[in-house]
Image (tube, rainbow, N blue to C red):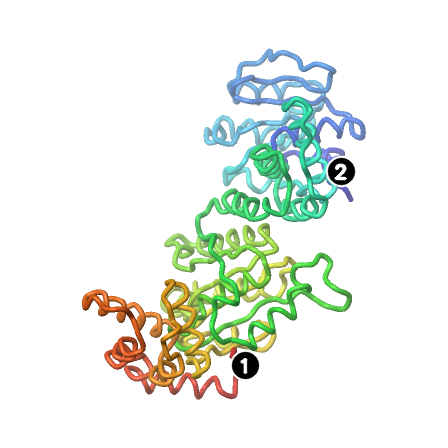
Amino acid sequence: MSELQDLVALIRADTPLLVIETPDEARVIELFRLTLMHAWRALYRWSITEGLRRMDFDREDESEVAPDLSATLEEIRQASQRGTYLLLDAHPYLGYASSQRLLRDIIQRRGSQPHVLVLIGTKVVVPEALEPFAVRFNLRLPDANALLKLVQDEARAYTTENGGRRVEADAAAVKQIVRNLQGMSLTDARRIARHLIYRDGVLGADDLPELARLKFEMLNRSGHLHYEYDTARFSDVGGAARLKRWIEQRRDAFVLDPPPAGLEPPKGVLLLGVQGCGKSLLAKAVAGGFGVPLVRLDFGTLYDKYHGETERNLRDALASTEQLAPCVLWIDEIEKGLAPSSGEGDGGLSRRVLGYLLTWMAERKSHVFLVATANQVHDLPPELLRKGRFDEIFFVDLPDPATRAEIFALHLDRRKLPREDIDLSALAAAADGFSGAEIEQVIVSALYATHAARTGIDTHALIQSIRDTRPLSVLMAEQVQALRTWAQSRTVPAG
């Protein structure tokens, strides 16, 4: 059934109390106007600023009732003709016992016609005493056709306002823009479309990153998500050839809508590994490899002292992520947010959070690719590691000699340092057991030393810096070796 048919059915059933949460107030009012053609009722609108106005005539009647909600409810209760009453932002005034009593009398038909009352607002908090009577009606988000019409309307408006200058639009880019606007309300989508059009009069592929940023800022009202503006390219990452190939093979299945015949969009990967070996950089590179936005979920901001709030925060964060699709969701050091050892001392909160996350991972239909990273595999819940939770579990090991040489070259080039006279093979051999992060710090340390000595950086200075460093594989040799041994037969090597 359509949205209009659903609403008409509720009105015909004389549903006493409807609750609609939406920022699109004008759209709701227009939707109720359309119901008059299918289920005629006297239609009224109330607000604290305008009072009660009748709307089912060609022109709206002036209010004859004071804006006070209690007086309005009394007028509704005494009305001789049944009607539909749209109460705009009325919920803050329902805290008074008299208003609640009047509303309950109308709902339970005590001396009242079978009216339909509709509480409308961006966020409607229904008093506990009235909640059992409330039926929540969720507006459907606009589909691709409605969004395309919206973009076309805004383009025509731009032409009118700019002396006939037409918007330069690339058809393929417009299709992508419409796809990325899906999941948003008409109000938010219109705001973004206007921004993209009016900033330069062009709709092209260059607008997609700006669209993703604006969409994220509108959806992330809770602050639990972080938009990573600087994603990486696979060329920025040394090694991990197997993971790079795995992502490249699945790119079309993830970004194309619909995906190629017979293929399903990939769901996600878990990156285990030694600290400092580039798991976070790889997460950024996965987003760059897919060519989609990267969003990071901070588990630390989800937890709340009030019962049920943490789970709600997680639901809201994941829902916002789905509205950003297609995108990559990155959960860094996931074991810290889902440590099973904390499940007994927190009243089962960690278990409930884990349960909801696992359900979402299994049932989501949106194009959200999950990349989770972890350092302490023994702190991960067994349920998370079960086959099928992730498409694959990759192990990011300490780099081999060829990868170490590649990492040295990457960091030298990033700092625009000449490397013609630097022996990368000698550096790779000397840095056995070093992680990528430790190799970067070797270069940083050598730069400080050569700057103090007023000399240029060379192979000798870098080898000296290597000799002055004790890598994690030495400082925590037992733990690192235990992790590598565990992963050898249980995971897929990233490199």
Kind of residue at badge 1: Val
Residue at (26, 75) in percent of width and height: 461
Placement of 357 over or under 180, stated as above or below: below
336 vs 256, left or right, is: left
User: Which residue extends farthest front?
Assistant: 421
Placement of 416 over or under 191, stated as above or below: below
Instruction: Find numbered disc 1 in the image and state the secondary structure of the residue it sits on.
Output: strand
Q: Pointer 1: what residue? A: 492
Cα–Cα gap, marks 1 and 2: 54 Å
- Front residue of 33/374: it is 374
- Front residue of 369/34: it is 369
189 vs 395, left or right, is: right
Kind of residue at badge 2: Ala
Q: Nearer the viewer, mark 1 or mark 2?
A: 1
Q: Pointer 2: what residue? A: 9
What is the x, y in percent for residue 444?
29, 67
User: Which residue extends farthest right?
Assistant: 38
User: Does the image show residue 23?
Assistant: no
